[in-house]
Amino acid sequence: ACKHLSHWLSPMGIDDLTPEFSPSAQTSGSNLAAIVAGLRHSREVTHKIRHQGHVRELPCRATLTQIRDGLLAALFPSHYGCSNLTDETIDYYVGHTLSRTLGALTEQVRRGLLLAPENRARFEEADCAACDIVRDFAAQLPAIRTALVNDLKAAYRGDPAATSLAEVLLCYPGMRAVIHYRIAHALTKLGAPLVPRMLASISQTETAIDIHPDAEIGPHFFIDHGVGVVIGQTAIIGENVRLYQHVTLGAKRFAEDETGALVKGEPRHPIIEDNVVIYAGATILGRVTVGKGSVIGGNVWLTRSVPPGSFVSQAQNRLAEEE
């Protein structure tokens, strides 16, 4: 296999191939040079997509995954960090972990700022702006942990199968998705571009739950089971809301400008008020409001607002739509 690799690196490597490799099936070094040249032409001339034509420094997904692990370890050190910490070592561990993690996060935020509109961050301003964002984010970590503990308790109360808070924290994909959301949302509100979206993407890959970091979600939030849940960018969710698997809070239509391009950032996702339960498979689309204390049944397709205290089932919703 090593000789096979050297074949790509040197035109002379073809003579040294072991018998199991057929030279006729390989690409010569000269062809490799042509492929590299063709890719360069696509990158630099015909299909150039670099931001502002020159930005190469991008946030790194692998590094952000490590940063995410560090933040989880700092927030819940015994659960996501080191399992044998003591009262004497836990603060040292958290401090050391945060020092390393926040330094790495600052660099990733700086890279993200280079992709922001020019009126928000230039190259020479990105370093200072990234430091400010991460400093303010770090100051919010105790409050973020408080919010997450409230979400954790809501999950424990809301699921009779949960035997302990530790089980919810370690085993529930919905809880893990909410942790990612709270972190990403805080960074978004502080003005960090791209990095929060990448953290949300990492969460979606691991949990199959898609929560846009711009969404506004109140305290005591619980996603049970969770797979297939989608919460759109402009969704607003109140306090003590519970969602089940395959719930979608999406857009019904997309506004276009005079050129036909989609208008970015328009409110287009649902508003879910306090103490609402939305059961599995329900789809709620558009800027509609689900009133406080309502229950939306499984597999309901809802494109209209419902008043507080409503119970919406498939049959009831079908009749209401017909009226």
Image (cartoon, rainbow, N blue to C red):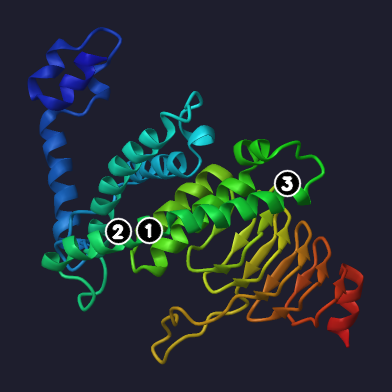
Q: Is residue 149 left or right of residue 85?
A: right
Q: From the top left corner, tell me how far across and down residue 236 is, in percent.
A: 60, 73
| Relative side of 221 to 293, left or right | left
Residue 160 versus residue 192 in the image, above or below? above
Task: Choose between 295 and 143: the one closer to the eye.
Answer: 143
**Farthest residue, direction front:** 88
Residue at 46 percent of width and 63 percent of height? 185
CA distance separating discs 1 and 3: 28 Å
Say which residue label 2 marks: 135
- Residue 160 lies left or right of residue 45; in this view the side is right
Q: Residues within 10 Å of mark 2 (few under 14, many from 20)?
A: few
Report whether residue 228 is seen.
Answer: no
Q: Nearer the viewer, residue 310 or 25?
A: 310
Q: Which mark is residue 156?
A: 3
Q: Residues within 10 Å of mark 3 (few under 14, many from 20)?
A: many
Identify the residue under disc 1: 139
Label 1, residues with CA under 10 Å away: few <14, some 14-19, many ≥20? few
Q: Assess whether mark 1 and mark 2 are in contact (beta carbons under 8 angstroms).
A: yes
Element type where label 1 sits in the image: helix
Q: Residue at x 71, y 67 (%)?
A: 283
Q: Given the current orientation, which residue lies at the most extreme bottom position?
A: 258
* Nearest to N terminus: mark 3 or mark 2: 2
Q: Quadrant of residue 6?
A: top left
Give the quarter of the figure containing the C terminus: bottom right
- Disc 1 marks which amino acid? Ala
Could you tell me which secondary element the residue under label 2 belongs to? helix
Q: Residue at x 64, y 78 (%)?
A: 286
x and y percentages locating residue 2 in the rendered image? 22, 15
Residue shown at 47%/45% (left/top)? 75
